[in-house]
Amino acid sequence: MVQSNRLPSLPHGVPADARHEVANALHSAALRLLRRARAADVTMDLDGPRASALSVLVFGGAMPIGRLAAVEQVSAPAITKTVTALEEAGLVRRTRSGADRRVVMVAATAKGRALLERGRAARVRAVADLLAELSDADLRTLRRAATLIARALSADPASLGARTD
């Protein structure tokens, strides 16, 4: 399937101003970029929800299972199923909190961190391949854009503060 580099028009009801035009372009490009990068995930042998949860734990650190559910925007039963699958694969471990024995903490294991790093490296290589023909100036522009987006996400309380590099 050949994709054009033409951007979709703004959705109905969205203001036609510069901010929304850029948001539309970023949204479209981010979705296509994620699809391309996700193709490299075959090396991890994890479905999207498991890869995402493992990423949160590797880059965000150990956390209560309820917080992981909130970050992943899923229900408690859904995150329990995901964590159970990751635990059975030896990629995460569950422990009781030392401060409150009712709280179940989830942390990535060394095996989980290694698997995620291999997958992340494959994704970065896939994205780098897309950038191979860009000029140094274009690469600097994209680097600046990525920095600005990361800064905005870090300041957004809706992001729940979890990095998922």
Image: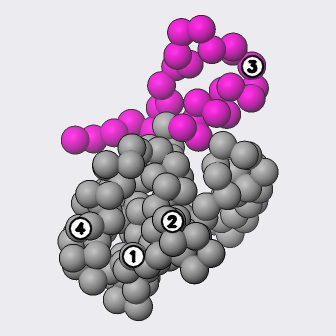
On the rendered structure, is 62 left or right of 142? Answer: left
In this view, 44 is above or below 48: below
Asked whether the residues under the numbered discs 2 and 4 touch, taking CB atoms below 8 Å apart as contact, a structural biologist would say no
Callout 1, which amino acid? Arg
Label 1: few (<14), some or many (≥20) within 10 Å? some
On the rendered structure, is 123 left or right of 25? Answer: left
Asked whether the residues under the numbered discs 3 and 4 touch, taking CB atoms below 8 Å apart as contact, a structural biologist would say no
Would you say residue 25 sits in the magenta stretch? yes
- Main SS, magenta region, reads loop
User: Looking at the image, which is closer to me, 44 or 156?
Assistant: 156
On the rendered structure, is 120 left or right of 80? Answer: right
Real-space CA distance between mark 2 and mark 4, rounded to the nearest whole angstrom: 19 Å
Q: Which residues are magenta?
A: 1-27
Circle number at residue 85: 4
SS assignment at label 3? loop
Front position among marks 3 and 4 = 4
The mark that comes first in sequence, 1 or 4, is 4
Could you say where residue 42 lies in the image, as x and y percent from the top left?
A: 22, 69
The mark that comes first in sequence, 1 or 3, is 3
Provide the residue designation for mark 2: 103
Q: Mark yes or no: residue 95 visible.
A: yes
